[in-house]
Image (cartoon, rainbow, N blue to C red):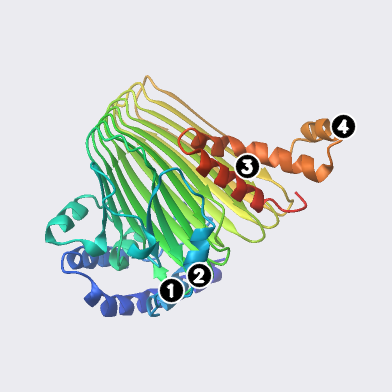
Amino acid sequence: MARSMEKRESRQATALATVEDAFGKLRGNSPPWLKPLQEKAFESFLGMGFPLSNDEDWKYTNLTKFAERSAEYLHSQSSRDDGGIIRSLIDDLPEIENEIRIVFVNGLFRADLSTATEPEDGIRLLPYSTADSTTAKQILQCQPADQSAMIAFNTAFMADGLAIHIADSKKCAAPIHVLFASDGQPAAAQPRLSIDIGRNADALVLQHHIGTGKGLVNAVTSINCAEHARIFYVRLQNESTQSMHVANQVVRVAADGHFDSISIDFGSQLARNDLDVDLHGERAIANLHGLFMADEGRHVDNHLRVDHHAINTTSQENYRGILNDEARGVFNGKIIVHTGADGTDAQMNNRNLLLSGKSEVDTKPELEIYTDDVKCAHGSTTGQLDINSMFYLRARGIPEITARAMLVTAFAQEIIDHVRSRAPSLADYLGNLMNRQLPSNT
């Protein structure tokens, strides 16, 4: 074990040295307003390095291959896709009602594939690559701290991004669909999305990752939900099963703010998602739902942290995993109720369905409570399809394969149905994607 760890550390150290060389060559391409931020972030990243499995938060996820692919791809020069690969991927997307679509390819904004970036009064969509000295100041105000190695890595190497600002009291009728696509070229994309929802505003934002080939993505999203604001945020990762995907979302919810999140992972060979929510205003609410499906040797890891800092705040977590073949899933949910956060109501539930005797899941729900007068609970279950339910369906003449598919679909559908009230066509699309994930011998 010790020798294996030493070898892993050596490989990551070699990758880190190559990344350092790449930063020296690439930082000259950044706009002047971004360079100081990137240089500071890269210093932070060098101090931390790529996470290792002796870090408790990365105990079950090995980033060695991710580090090595990052080092290789940062030295590669990807070209603009004019061969129709991205357009064919886009043609397969859902037609969401009245959506505003903004497209990035290999981390770079593509105006030719996007709708207008100034859609209507009260909604501002600003690609970082189009920012000037004035708008750049607005972008810099919305960036998360480089609190983790992967956030710092993204900041150091990001070439573009999108800032979304919803004005006070603006109720967005149109969903905002931010599409990050990988076209199969050797590109280490560092997508950055910052969302600022004004007081009493309401919006639906879909952050959508698709791609082909051995893509590499390290995405960072920051969300600021002001007083009495509401955001319905959907993160859908459906990249190539040869790709690697790491994502961080950092969320702050002010007094009486409401954050609804649906996180879905259907793709990637390795997927890691960190969601960090800070309920810092009185009566702030966070509803966090998630679904992940994996087969063959794929690996999906979800890490959630919710900090209750204010009184009468509420959080609900409901994550479900479906694993087949030799796939591995990880769920770590942590709720921290800080001193003074009286009246907190925090509930966490993780359920996992194993369709194969070779699949595996590691689940770790955690509660830390530093005050009185709270209502908190957590639970986790892992098992196979219910025998009694199978018998009930089979007794009514339903074939075994069909019966198994029905039970798996019912298990996942509850998560997808949370989308239906806001975007029915998106819910239908998610249901179709889920059905494609089901093996023929389910």
* Label 2: few (<14), some (14–19) or many (≥20) C-alpha neighbours in 10 Å: some
Q: Which residue is mark 3?
A: 352
Which SS class for mark 4? Answer: loop
Q: Which residue is mark 1?
A: 81
Q: Is residue 379 left or right of residue 275?
A: right
Q: Residue at x 39, y 43 (%)?
A: 175
Residue 39 locus on image (x, y percent): 22, 68
Kindly report the distance in space between the C-alpha atoms of the residues bearing marks 1 and 3: 39 Å
Identify the amino acid type marked 4: Ala
Kindly report the distance in space between the C-alpha atoms of the residues bearing marks 1 and 2: 7 Å
Asked if marks 1 and 2 touch (Cβ < 8 Å), the reply is: yes
Identify the amino acid type marked 2: Ile
User: Visible in this render: residue 16?
Assistant: yes
Kindly report the distance in space between the C-alpha atoms of the residues bearing marks 2 and 4: 47 Å
Residue 373 locus on image (x, y percent): 37, 19
Which SS class for mark 3? Answer: strand
Q: Quadrant of residue 188?
A: bottom left
- Of the numbered discs 3 and 4, the one sitting upstream in the chain is 3
Q: Quadrant of residue 404?
A: top right
Judge whether 6 appears above or below 99 on screen.
below
**Badge number at residue 85:** 2
Which SS class for mark 1? Answer: loop
Q: Residue at x 27, y 67 (%)?
A: 42
- Of the numbered discs 3 and 2, the one sitting upstream in the chain is 2
Of tags 2 and 4, the one toward the viewer is 2
Q: Residue furthest left?
A: 134
Identify the amino acid type marked 1: Asp
Kindly report the distance in space between the C-alpha atoms of the residues bearing marks 3 and 4: 26 Å
Q: Is residue 245 left or right of residue 158?
A: right
- Of the numbered discs 1 and 3, the one sitting upstream in the chain is 1
Q: Which residue is mark 4?
A: 395
Identify the amino acid type marked 3: Asn
